[in-house]
Structure formats: C-alpha cells, structure tokens
C-alpha cells in the first residue's frame, strides 16, 4: 500500500467534520481510487451471484427429476399419490421447519450450515482460488465480514436458500404439468396398517386449501374408490382430473407459495438490515483508525518563550570546605518521614540538633540561630526520596551565607527510595542532588550518600570520618592519581615488551595503594609472590579475578582479557613490589608472557586476542586492565557483593568500543571515575 | 454552553507528574518528556482533549514550581504600602525583573495559569505536606483561578492521601481528585472531569460529552482486545500439522515448527494489544512474562508456566500432553455434533464428516495430526486476559514495563472457566486458521462460521477482560 496515499487519505478524512464512521468511509473511498478494491468487490459479488444462479438452475432440474422419478415412466401402473406428494414436498417441508426452528431458537446464529451458506462458501473458495491478486482475497474477506453480521448474514443466506427451493418447486411444477399433460396416470392410495378412514380424512384435510383456491379436488366418493387394489383400473376421467389438480394445487400452495413468501420476507429483511448496517467500530482495526482519524486528543506546540532566558544552567564551581573545631550542627531539610530520631549519636563528636526544616518559619529560625553559633560544620541532611529543587539550592546558599562554618550535606533515605527506584534511578537522584547542592555552594566531595535511618557499624565509621574530616582526602583521590599514572604510561608508547610496560604500570598502581593496606588486595585476587610454580599461581589468580568480575563482564571478551591480564600481572606485581627491579629484566618473564597469552586465547576464544604481543599492545586492553586493577584496589576491604555491584554499574555504562587515542582514553577514564563515584555512592546510600 | 474549549493549566511542584497526567489523559506515551528528575519540562506545552473530534478541554503542561518559599517571600516584599490585591501583586511580579531571572520557571507557570479558566494542581501523594506545598497553594490562590488538586501516585503503598486531603480541606480545597498517572483507574478519571464540571458550570455539557465519549471508547477497547485474543485463539486452535506416524525426527521438527508458529502468533497478539491501547512493544517486558528477543520468555509448553497460570496439569496424560504435543485423536472431534437445530446439525455433520474423512485418509496414508494441546490454549487465554487487564490499568505515563499480577487465584479463575465451545469447533476446521497454510496470512479467513465463532469467543472473553464488579 503506498504510504503517501495513505497519509493523504488520513488527512482528508481527519479534516471531515463528522463522526468517526463517515471519516472511515471517506478514507476508504479515497484509498479506493488507487487500490481499486471496489472493482474486486463487484467482480466477487458477480461471481457469487453466478454461483446462486447455477444453484437455481440445478435445483430446478432437481425438482423436475424428483417429480419424474416418483411419477415413474411405467404409466401402465397406477401411481401412489402420497409417494409423489412426499417426493415433491417431503424434504423441503422438513427443511422449512428446520429453518423456522433455527430462526426462532437461535436468532443470533448465521445458520452457516444451511444451503445458502454452502453456496456462498463454495463461491468464496472459487474466487479465492481463481483470483491471483490480493484484491480478490480482500474482497472475499470484506464480503464475508459484512455477511457475518447476524441480521444481514441470516437473511442473505435465507434468501438464497428459499430461492433455491423456490426454483426446485418451479421445476417440479413444470415437470408435473408436462407429464400430466402428456401421459395417462391412474392415482391410487394404499395402506397396510392404517385405517381407510384416516386416509379419507387426511386427503380431505390436505385438499381444503386447494379447494379454497378453486383447485379441483377429489370428492369423498372418488377418494374411497381410489383405494388400491380395489380401485377400478379404469378410473373415471373425472377422478383422474381431480387427483392431478390436487397434486398441482399442493405443490403450488404448500411448496411454491410458502417459499415465494419466505423469499420475499428474507429479501425485505435483508434490505432493512443492510439499510441499518453500521461499521462495527469495536473491531480492533477500526480502533486503530480511530487514533488516526478521530484521536481522543491533539497536542499542539506552543511558541517558545520570548523572554530569552537560557534554561540550561552551568554547573557552578564549588570548593571543598575544611572542617573546623566545634560542635557539628545537624538539620533535616524537608524530611520525608517525621519519625526519624535527630540527631544521630556519634561517639566523641559533639552534635547540635537544629531540627527539621519544613516551612518558611523553620528556615528563618535556623538562619537566625546560625548567625550567632560557633560551629565546626553545618550538615544539611537531605532526603533522597524528595526531588531536589531550586528551593533546596536557595536554602543551601542561605545556610552558607548565614554561618562561617563549612556546609556539608548528607543524602539519607536511600533504603526508602530503593522501594521506588532501581539502581539507575538512585544514581540519577544522587547526581541530581549533588547538582542542586552545587548550586547551593556545596562541593561534590562534601556530599555523603548515607542512610541515617539504617546505620551499620561500617556506615557509622564513614559518617564519623565525614563529620570529623579525618582522612577526608582519601576518598576517590587515589583513583584519580591512578588514572593519571595510567594515562602517563599509555602516553609512553612501549618500544620494548608491551606486557612488561603494563606490569610496571600495575606495580606503580599497587604502590599507590600500598601505604595503608599492604596485602589486602593480594588476598582479594588470590595472588602469591611464590615463584616456584608460576603458571599455577597465575592461573589461580586469574581464576580468582575473573570470579570477582560481575556476570555481565564475565561474558564480554574485552573484560575477560582485562581480567586475565590483571590477575596474571598481579603475581608479577606482588613479586616485584618490594624489590624494585626492572620487570623486563626478570628471567621468568617469557614464561609469564606465554602463560598470559595462552590464557587469554583460551578464555576469550576471540581471534583478536591471540598472542601476548597483540594483546597488550592494544591501547584499549591496556587501559581496561589497568583501570580494573586500580578500581579493585580502590574497592579492597569492601564485601564482594559491593565490589561486584560497583564494578558492574561502572563498567556497563562505559563505552565498549576501542579506545584509540590518548584523548579518548582521558575521556574514557573521566567517565569511568564519574560512574565509579556514583555507583559507589548509590551502593553506600543504602548500606 | 460556550463554544471555546475550556482552558486548564496543569501546575504543581517539580517532578510530581504534571506531564504524566497529560500523557495519561491524552493516551499518548510520547507527549512531552517524563523522567524521575526535577525540572524536566521547561516550556509550556499544550494539548486538546476531543470528544468525537470536537475540542472540549485545552490542557497546558507547565514547568514545576520549584522555589515557592522564596517566591512568596518575594511577592510579599513587593506589597509595600500600596493597597494592591493579590492578583495585582502576581501580575506586577510577572512584569518585573525577577520573573525573567530567579523565578523564570515559576513565572512561566503562573503566566499560563492567568490565561486559563482553571488549574489542576498535581500532588505527589507520597510526599509529606511541607511548607513549600503550602506556599505553592497560597500563590495559586492569589492567582484567583479555581484550583482542583489532583493526587498522583495514590496507588503507591506509601501514599499519604488522607494527610493531603486533610490539609487541602484546611485551605478550602474540598474537591480534590485522585488520579494515579501510572495505575490507571477509569472511575478516577471520570471523577476528575466531574469535579471540573462542578467548578466550571458553564462547560458541563461539553465535559459530560467528553466523559461519555471516553466511557464508550473504553468499552470499545475491551471488545477490541477480546476480538484480537479470539482471533489468535482460533488461529491456534485450528492449527494442524500432519507428519508421518513412524517418522520420529520428522515429528519432532514438526512439533518445533508448530511451537514456533504458536509463539509467533501469540506475540503478534501481544503487539496488537499494546498497539491498540496506544503503548509501545517495549512496554511489555516484565520479569514474570518476559519477552526476550521479541518472544515470550516463559515456555508456553512447560509445566511450570502452566502452573504459574493455575492451569491444572494433574493427570499423567495431561503432563504428557504438556511435555510434548497432543496428538489429536479421532474422538476429540466427536464432541462437536451439539447443534440444536437440524440445519445447523447438517452443517456441523458435514464439517465433521469432512474433517474425519480427511483424518481417515491421513491415517490410511500413515500420517498423524499434530495440534496445540488444550492446556496450552487455556494458558494462552489466561495469559492474554491477564495481559489485557494489566494494560487496561496502565497509565500512559508508566515507565516501567507491564508487570503481571502475581495473584494466582485471579489467573486461575480466568482459566478454570469452561473451555470455550468455539475452540472445540475450531479444532475441526483447519481452514479457520490463518497460520495453517504454508504461507501464513495476516488476515483471518472470512469463513462465516469462523467469524461467528470469533464473535462468540470475543463475547466470552470480554467478560473475562472486564473488571469484576
């Protein structure tokens, strides 16, 4: 179907002022100009009419054949009147009764099994078989749909049925008149078990209507004298005439007449049903058209604001604030729950509760209080379930202005927010709050995501560190330094052994972290400095490293490679950390190189990672393995679930393609750090 | 009745779901931008609700009121000694300097409100009633327009609907409407419009027309969904494949192809349902009924999934039928001749005779017929009915994919109803299946019997899809 025409037709129909139905009809007319379906429909209809016509002829022949068979050719024999009558009227009388029953008992049904139904079905099949194009099938479908309406379908099929039987009667009548005129018949009746009187009564009852219609009917004496075999072989001509006339009268009045009436009735019912025909707008197809032609709503674009105010606000630069001596004031900014107990108790930290800030008056009161107090810091506790707004930023700004003490913020309520949002949502919310607070003058490192309602020993420790400012430079700083190391190493293109350069980088990163936690990472990565069975210990630490990787990274060839290098180089790093020798000078070096290359090829199964030279020479692989190592070291000491979750969140958003230039590597690392920061914060927000 | 449509500004605090309210009222998943973040809507956007093509309500989405506390401070500070009323204060603010700088977002919303007949004030019912909300209501009251509070997210567990109603009553707003933009409720929508009609009496006839149009539309959606499901069920029930009885590998591959055909057909039904209700294909990707790579994740033929939907799979025969595929035996068709009237009986007998004759021919030629088992059909009914009900209660602002109810009783109730008669008839009429031919058709066959069966089945399904009263 040509799309342009479709769109044009839709538009024309939509412009029409009227109900949906007329719009659909308008659209159909418009589409028909190109699709020419109405031609297909009329050709299908004429085929169906031909089918009915053939049926009519067939039934006329049938009627004639039925009469001829029952009257018999052996005209020397007397003819049983009731057998002829039964042959002509019997079956159709039963079927008329059946038709009436269906109409009365199941008015909703189509009586699809009827004669009319068959005729149409056969016609449809023929059309479908003959027509090669889509039009024929669509036309059959369309006609079938219209006929499937109970009223239309029932009366159409009934009309066809009655027309066929009418023609049966006409055929029978013609054959009867012809045979009775051309031949000589003696009509008799006979019985074995019935009383003779019964036949006389029956015949008179049957004859009542023809007599009324001025047909000649046999008298009682004539009836009695026609009893076989007593009947006179030379039946009186008058009696013969009376019997033949009764036979004709019965076919006309009990067969032809009723069918004619029923045909007329069916046709008029059909006509009124067709006149009442409405599109079935409940059909799903029409409902789809409704959204196009008569939608429930229309959106309109308004002209942009003329005030010329830029909507995008730049992220302000903020500075980290140093804690000072003095009590720490805690205020709950628009807390989402009233039941939170304030303040939180932390040993040997003096806290001052400024209460909950819910209204304008609260804000004024606190701002006035702060003017006079000597404080170590002011902590604004925000709720992650609340959406940060400019009101929060403005209040933070006012807080900073009101007090000389540094303003910090805690994002609490992580667990409650967890019920509404997924990990992405939590990270997003933390980022939004950081941005809002940055507008209020609070630097990102002065914002701590921590659920005050669900404090654990670990989060208490973090809270304490945050409040007192002890070791405040630690968080995130080392990863930043490690990233600088990585960039520096990548910039110095290796001229010798690439793997050795990489090993040196890993050793430098390990040194960065060795000041406070000397051997924790070795346990974490299952690294041993034992060189007696190097290939076994390499395999052990590689297995371990890959085990720590989250599931999604474990199926990614790039991260398998990075994990393998990290694990393998961990051994080298551990061995050379204390004695700073040039790594490339180590005698065992070639063994390690071979082992790593083999492992990577085995594990990743990818052709691009064959051999150690190709593997470590790639900037992307070197970058990934180094940053993985640094991130693992950054996370050491945390439980494995957290490590895995943070790695998962950090790595999955990262660009997965090749990193080719140093600039790209720098951007990649910045992005990595940002993600890591948010992922860690969102994990800690709920701890 | 006035000819011009009623103009309504949708206002509220940031991220309470103003754009979501519009999406759900417009039945348009693409309107504006919706996110769980602050200040997503930065410009005023509008839309008109139509009743049978005629505009009734014009709605304007506005940026959120973010800093009402300071705005109210600002407004009060400008009052000075002059004797100005509140509307004049707001108008003076809109013309002033602050309206284009500090309070630009708020100014856009208030400017729009002053051009409208009324406001819908959207509230996140999960929030506590805070000072900023009170100040927002104060500022809105100063604009001297009728305000209808709309409580969003009332279906959430932590909604504080009562608390909000109490507070709203305290500031004189007694006619608050509940309308969850994510969990759609037809009655709530009607009540929202009725509240508007009460406040803005001149527009009552138009709003009544809108309500009537929407009610009719919803009934049509129910019937349309039922038709889609009925069509799919008939296609599947009438689907048949013949294989050589003694060819085990051929049978297995035929079974696999049958499964694929059924799954693909069901998927088409799911897509059709989503499209019918104005959702996108990706809106149905729940954990309970996942569609992975465009397929239903749960195996239609696995005993677990049957149990999940409460379809009884007790007997060994049933389990066998579930594990593999039912090989339709001749007796399966014999239940058919139930037509009451002679005409219908003749037709049915003819159909049955034709079908059995084909079977006898096949049997003589050493062929067996493969069909989708009854249990799988029951499961299909249960799944599609559950999906439709979920979609019927999905707001167009919902971001998470459709998640089907875990309530097993409800699911089993829908599947434990008697096996629809039409499906038994369909079993005997391979011609009724659009997926039967080697080249599957998109359009259902136009057989009058099939159409009648589809309509009967759809009537049966509408009752299941509709809410229990």
Image (cartoon, rainbow, N blue to C red):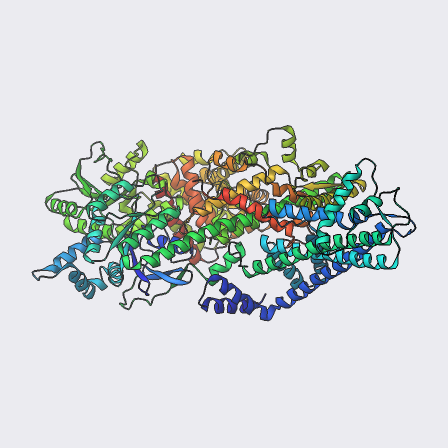
Return the residue found at the far bottom.
A33
Asked if residue A342 shows in the view, the reply is yes
Taking B415 as reference, is A336 left or right?
left
Which of B162/B296 is in front?
A: B162
- Of residues A504 and B172, the one drawn nearer to the viewer in this rendering: B172
Q: Residue furthest front?
A: A221
Residue B123's place in the image compared with B408, above or below, is below
Looking at the image, how many numbered discs can be counted on the residues?
Answer: 0
Q: Name the one closer to the observer, A226 or B168.
A: A226
Q: Give me the residue at 82% from left, 44% from top.
A: A224
Q: In this view, does A72 lie above or below B97?
A: above
Seen in the picture, residue B74 relative to B151 is either above or below; the reply is below
Q: Judge left or right: residue B113 versus residue A18.
A: left
Q: Quadrant of the N terminus of chain A?
A: bottom right
Spot occupied by residue A465 in the image (x, y as percentages of width and height): 26, 38
| Farthest top residue in view | B315
Task: Establish if A112 lies above or below A51.
Answer: above
Residue A259 rendering spot, x and y as whole percentages? 69, 55
**Relative horizontal placement of residue B12, taking residue A174 as reference (left or right):** left
Does residue B434 appear in the picture of this structure?
no
Residue A102, percent from left and from top: 63, 46
Q: Position of residue A515 (x, y in %)?
A: 34, 39
Check the picture and name the quadrant holding the C terminus of chain A: top left
The part of the image, by quadrant, that contains residue B426 is: top right
- Image quadrant of residue A249? bottom right
């Amino acid at each position: 179907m040509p799309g342009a025409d479709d769109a044009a037709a839709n538009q024309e129909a939509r412009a029409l002022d009227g109900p949906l139905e007329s719009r659909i009809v308008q659209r159909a007319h418009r589409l028909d100009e190109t699709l020419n379906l109405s031609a297909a429909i009329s050709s299908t209809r004429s085929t169906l009419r031909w089918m009915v016509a053939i049926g009519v002829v067939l039934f006329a022949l049938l009627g004639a054949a039925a009469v001829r068979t029952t009257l018999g050719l052996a005209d020397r024999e007397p003819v049983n009147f009731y057998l002829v009558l039964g042959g002509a009227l019997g079956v159709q009388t039963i079927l008329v009764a059946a038709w009436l029953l269906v109409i009365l008992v199941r008015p909703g049904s189509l009586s699809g099994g009827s004669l009319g139904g068959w005729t149409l079905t056969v016609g449809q099949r023929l059309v479908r078989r003959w027509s090669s194009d889509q039009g024929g099938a669509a036309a059959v479908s369309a006609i079938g749909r219209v006929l499937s309406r109970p009223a239309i379908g029932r009366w159409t099929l009934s009309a066809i049925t009655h027309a066929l039987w009418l023609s049966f009667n006409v055929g029978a009548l013609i054959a009867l008149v012809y045979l009775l005129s051309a031949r000589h018949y003696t009509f008799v009746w006979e019985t074995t078990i019935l009383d003779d009187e019964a036949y006389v009564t029956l015949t008179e009852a049957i004859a009542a209507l023809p007599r009324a219609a001025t047909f000649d009917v046999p008298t009682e004496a004539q009836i009695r004298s026609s009893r076989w075999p007593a009947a006179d072989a030379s039946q009186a001509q008058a009696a013969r005439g009376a019997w033949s006339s009764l036979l004709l009268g019965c076919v006309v009045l009990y067969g032809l007449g009723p069918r004619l009436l029923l045909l007329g009735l069916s046709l008029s019912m059909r006509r009124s049903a067709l006149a009442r025909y409405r599109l079935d707008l409940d059909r799903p197809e029409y409902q789809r058209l409704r959204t196009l032609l008569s939608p429930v709503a229309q959106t309109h674009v308004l002209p942009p604001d003329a005030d010329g105010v830029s909507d995008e606000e730049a992220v302000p630069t903020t500075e980290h604030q140093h804690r000072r001596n003095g009590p720490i004031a805690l205020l709950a900014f628009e807390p989402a729950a009233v039941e939170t107990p304030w303040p939180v108790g932390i040993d040997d930290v003096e806290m001052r509760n400024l209460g909950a800030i819910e209204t304008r008056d609260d804000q004024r009161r606190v701002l006035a209080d702060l003017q006079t107090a000597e404080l170590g810091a002011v902590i604004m506790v925000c709720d992650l379930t609340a959406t940060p707004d400019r009101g929060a930023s403005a209040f933070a700004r006012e807080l900073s202005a009101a007090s000389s003490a540094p303003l910090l913020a805690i994002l609490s309520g992580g667990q409650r927010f967890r019920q509404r949002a997924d990990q992405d949502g939590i990270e997003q919310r933390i980022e939004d709050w950081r941005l809002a607070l940055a507008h209020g003058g609070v630097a990102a490192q002065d914002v701590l995501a921590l659920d005050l309602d669900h404090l654990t020993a670990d989060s208490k420790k973090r809270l304490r560190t945050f409040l007192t400012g002890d070791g405040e430079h630690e968080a995130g700083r080392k990863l930043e330094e490690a990233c600088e190391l990585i960039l520096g190493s990548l910039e110095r293109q290796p001229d010798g052994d690439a793997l050795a350069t990489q090993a040196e980088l890993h050793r430098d990163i390990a040194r960065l972290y060795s000041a406070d936690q000397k051997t924790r990472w070795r346990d974490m990565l299952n690294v041993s400095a034992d060189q007696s069975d190097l290939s076994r210990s390499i395999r052990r630490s590689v297995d371990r490293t890959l085990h720590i990787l989250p599931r999604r990274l474990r199926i990614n060839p790039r991260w398998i490679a990075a994990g393998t290098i990290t694990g393998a180089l961990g051994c080298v790093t551990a061995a050379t950390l204390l004695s700073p020798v040039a790594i490339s000078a180590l005698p065992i070096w070639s063994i390690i190189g071979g082992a790593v290359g083999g492992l990577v090829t085995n594990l990743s199964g990818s052709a691009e990672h064959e051999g150690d030279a190709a593997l470590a020479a790639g900037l992307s692989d070197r970058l990934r393995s180094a940053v993985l190592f640094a991130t693992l070291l950054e996370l050491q000491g945390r439980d494995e679930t957290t490590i895995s979750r943070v790695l998962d969140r950090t790595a999955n958003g990262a660009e997965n393609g090749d990193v080719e230039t140093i600039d790209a590597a720098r951007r990649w690392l910045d992005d990595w750090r940002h993600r890591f920061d948010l992922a860690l914060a969102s994990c800690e927000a709920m701890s | 009745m006035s000819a011009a449509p009623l103009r309504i500004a949708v206002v509220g605090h940031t991220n309470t779901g103003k754009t979501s309210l519009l999406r759900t009222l417009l039945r348009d998943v693409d309107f504006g931008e919706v996110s769980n973040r602050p200040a997503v809507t930065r410009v005023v956007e509008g839309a008109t609700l139509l009743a049978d093509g005629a505009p009734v309500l014009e709605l304007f989405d506005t940026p959120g009121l973010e800093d009402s506390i300071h705005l109210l401070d600002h407004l009060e500070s400008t009052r000075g000694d002059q004797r100005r009323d509140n509307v004049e204060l707001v108008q003076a603010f809109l013309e002033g300097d602050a309206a284009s700088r500090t309070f630009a977002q708020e100014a856009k919303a208030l400017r729009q409100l002053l051009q409208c007949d009324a406001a819908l004030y959207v509230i996140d019912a999960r929030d506590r009633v805070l000072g900023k909300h009170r100040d927002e209501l104060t500022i809105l009251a100063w604009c001297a327009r009728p305000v209808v509070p709309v409580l969003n997210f009332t279906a959430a567990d932590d909604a504080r609907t009562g608390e909000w109603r109490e507070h709203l009553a305290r500031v004189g707003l007694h006619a608050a409407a509940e309308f969850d933009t994510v969990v759609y409720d037809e009655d709530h929508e009607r009540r929202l419009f009725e509240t508007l009609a009460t406040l803005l009496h001149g527009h009552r006839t138009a709003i009544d027309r809108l309500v009537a149009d929407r009610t009719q539309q919803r009934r049509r959606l129910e019937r349309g969904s039922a038709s889609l499901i009925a069509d799919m069920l008939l296609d599947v029930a009438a689907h048949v494949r013949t294989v050589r009885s003694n060819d085990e590998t051929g049978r297995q591959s035929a079974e696999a192809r049958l499964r694929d055909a059924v799954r693909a057909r069901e998927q088409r039904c799911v897509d059709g349902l989503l499209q019918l209700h104005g959702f996108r294909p990706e809106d149905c990707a729940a954990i309970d009924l996942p569609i992975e790579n465009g397929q239903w994740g749960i195996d239609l033929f696995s005993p677990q999934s049957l149990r999940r939907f409460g379809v009884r799979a007790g007997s060994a025969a049933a389990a066998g039928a579930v594990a593999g595929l039912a090989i339709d035996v001749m007796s399966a068709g014999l239940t058919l001749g139930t037509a009451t009237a002679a005409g219908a009986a003749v037709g049915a007998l003819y159909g049955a005779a034709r079908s059995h004759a084909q079977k006898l021919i096949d049997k003589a030629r050493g062929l067996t017929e493969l069909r989708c088992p009854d249990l799988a059909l029951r499961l299909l009914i249960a799944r599609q009915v559950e999906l439709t009900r979920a979609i019927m209660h999905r707001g167009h602002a919902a971001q998470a994919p459709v998640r089907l109810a875990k309530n097993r009783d409800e699911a089993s109730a829908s599947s434990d109803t008697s096996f629809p008669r039409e499906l038994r008839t369909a079993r005997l009429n391979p011609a009724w299946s659009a997926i039967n031919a080697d080249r599957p058709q998109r359009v259902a066959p136009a057989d009058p019997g099939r159409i009648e069966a589809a309509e009967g089945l759809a009537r049966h399904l509408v009752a299941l899809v509709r809410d229990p009263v």
